[in-house]
Image: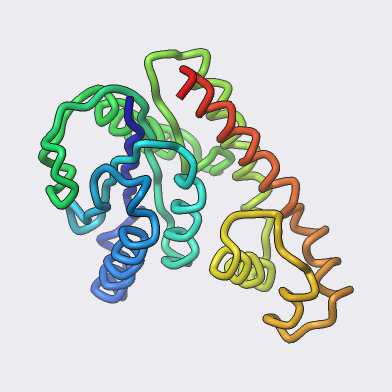
């Protein structure tokens, strides 16, 4: 069983600095390929001008990777489709994900398609930019509803709060386990100020939900 990730840049043809964004995307994918090589089965690649893919052997780091990509490309919006299932492919890690096929890819592609369909139907975006598809519809429904709740929290973050959280993810990862006093030094702010900001963002609750969700997904089939 494998975990597939497809990322799709929203409204990519209308991005004014499109070449710069593509360079930033290529750079962050290269860094991810180095940092997470132990969990990657296939290196993350840009498959089209506005799309990228990767294959993972575990789910451990996928949320963190998605957040690093999102924050690196701000304010560009990204859809993420996740699939879980079997894959047939050449085991060569350097080969493009295009050289593989199977249900995990079909599910991830279906997830991207479903997000686009929701965007077309609803004028107000109150659903997540992340969706998962598997062979279990009830499992998918529960997971994707939690994604929606996470999106509601994230969409309330201000520009200043986003910069703080980007700093956390860059230096510590998508985690609750860091010292606020150290973060305050990085931000050049007083610890009480940082503490108040973290409370307002509900960042700890956000990460706790992700940790619980990751554990649930990993235990889906005892993986």
Residue at image coords 40%, 52%: 78
Q: Quadrant of the N terminus?
A: top left
Residue 125 on image: x %, y %:
54, 43
Q: Is residue 171 above or below residue 13?
A: below
Q: Is residue 133 left or right of residue 67?
A: left
Residue at image coords 12%, 48%: 95
Q: Which one is nearer the viewer's eye here, 60 or 15?
A: 60
Residue at image coords 47%, 40%: 130
Colour scheme of the rendered structure? rainbow
Residue at image coords 84%, 67%: 195
The quadrant holding residue 188 is bottom right
The quadrant holding residue 189 is bottom right
Q: Is residue 212 above or below residue 40?
A: above
Q: Which one is nearer the viewer's eye here, 219 or 50?
A: 219
Q: Which one is nearer the viewer's eye here, 156 or 52?
A: 52
Total numbered labels = 0
Residue situated furthest bottom in the rendering: 188
Residue situated furthest front in the rendering: 38
The quadrant holding residue 121 is top left
Residue 210 on image: x %, y %:
61, 41
Q: Quadrant of the C terminus?
A: top left
Residue situated furthest right in the rendering: 192
Q: Is residue 192 left or right of residue 11?
A: right
Q: Which one is nearer the viewer's eye here, 215 or 11?
A: 215
Q: Is residue 76 left or right of residue 182?
A: left
Residue 117 on image: x %, y %:
37, 32
Residue 55 on image: x %, y %:
29, 41
Q: Is residue 6 above or below residue 78?
A: above
Q: Is residue 175 left or right of residue 6?
A: right
């Amino acid at each position: 069983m494998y975990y597939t990730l497809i990322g799709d840049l929203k409204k990519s043809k209308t991005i004014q600095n499109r070449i710069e964004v593509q360079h930033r995307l290529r750079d962050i994918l290269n860094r991810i390929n180095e940092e997470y090589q132990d969990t990657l089965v296939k290196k993350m690649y840009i498959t089209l001008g506005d799309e990228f893919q990767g294959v993972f052997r575990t789910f451990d780091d996928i949320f963190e990777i998605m957040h690093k990509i999102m924050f690196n490309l701000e304010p560009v919006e990204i859809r993420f489709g996740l699939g879980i299932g079997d894959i047939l492919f050449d085991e060569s890690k350097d080969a493009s994900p295009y050289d593989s096929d199977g249900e995990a890819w079909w599910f991830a592609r279906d997830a991207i398609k479903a997000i686009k369909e929701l965007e077309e139907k609803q004028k107000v975006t109150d659903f997540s930019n992340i969706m998962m598809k598997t062979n279990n519809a009830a499992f998918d429904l529960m997971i994707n509803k939690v994604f929606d709740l996470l999106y509601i929290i994230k969409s309330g973050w201000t520009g200043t709060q986003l910069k703080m959280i980007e700093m956390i993810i860059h230096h510590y990862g998508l985690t609750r386990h860091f010292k606020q006093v150290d973060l305050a030094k990085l931000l050049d702010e007083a610890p009480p100020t940082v503490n108040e900001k973290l409370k307002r963002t509900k960042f700890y609750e956000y990460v706790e939900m992700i940790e619980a969700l990751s554990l649930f997904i990993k235990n889906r089939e005892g993986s």
